[in-house]
Image (cartoon, rainbow, N blue to C red):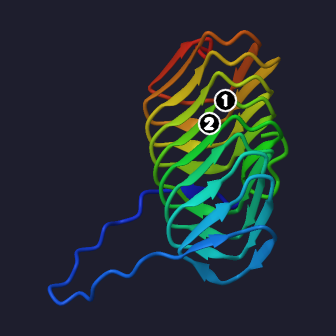
Amino acid sequence: MKRVIFALAAVACAGIFASPATAATTTQCTSTLTGGTYDKIVVPAGATCTLDGATVNSNVTVGAGSSLHTRFTTIGGNVMSRDAASVRLIDTNISHNVMITGTTGSTKIGSKGCKVDPIAAGNLMFKFNSGTIAICDVSVGHNLALMANSGRIGAFRNVVGNNGLLFRNTGPANRLRDNTVTVNINCSGNTGRVITSGNTAAQLMGQCHS
């Protein structure tokens, strides 16, 4: 199965005779953008944006009540979402961090076949989301952190370069299966069921000890 990877982009050295930097252009996305290259994307409050086969050089920012759907897209910066309606990043490579907070609908990150639950160089962070969260077949450069979410959580077959953290989630079920984590998988303070199997890490801690 194709794996989506979130990995840090390399920082290139500027040449002695480099031309002056030009100001980045921000594109307001309120429909479907197929292909093309964009400096920055902003999804305004209440809008729905679909990026299909697009390249974004820098950040994608998702506004309150809006929806972002991507497929076969490359994002060179961060994906930042606060109080969105839904976020779906499918077969999408992201060079830095994904920070999803307060989403009311579903969040799906990973491959096309991800059903409840691409390369990313930084962290995947989910906080205070009330909708379901599904993360599968993702390579995470640093940490995968799920904290204080109230919907169902599924994290399957991910490869994490640092820690996997599952803290104080209140949804009815938290499922972690077949994840490979370099350092620790640490779970504590979750009030719903924590269901784990097939995970490997230097240490399995707290509610994820088995």
**Distance between the alpha carbons at the discs numbered 2 and 1:** 7 Å
Q: Which mark is residue 179?
A: 2
> Which residue lies at the image location 70% right of the left edge and 82% below the top edge?
35
- For label 1, count other residues whose C-alpha is less than 10 Å away and answer few (under 14), some (14-19) or many (20+): few
Instruction: Find residue 205 and report its horizontal and vertical position in percent.
Output: 52, 15
Per the image, the residue denoted by label 1 is 198
Q: Image quadrant of residue 150?
A: top right
> Which residue lies at the image location 49% right of the left edge and 61% below the top edge?
77
Q: Secondary structure at mark 1?
A: loop
Please tell me whether residue 112 is drawn above or below residue 186 in the rendered image.
below
Marks 1 and 2: in contact by CB < 8 Å? yes
Looking at the picture, tell me which residue is in the foreground, 137 or 108: 108
Q: Image quadrant of residue 161?
A: top left
Whether residue 153 sits left or right of residue 146 in the image: it is right
Residue at the front extreme of this rendering? 45
> Which residue lies at the image location 63% right of the left edge and 41% below the top edge?
100
Please tell me whether residue 135 is drawn above or below residue 55 in the rendered image.
above
> Which residue lies at the image location 19% right of the left edge and 84% below the top edge?
15
Closer to us: mark 2 or mark 1? 2
Whether residue 80 sits left or right of residue 193 in the image: it is left
Instruction: Find residue 158 and report its horizontal and vertical position in percent.
Output: 62, 43
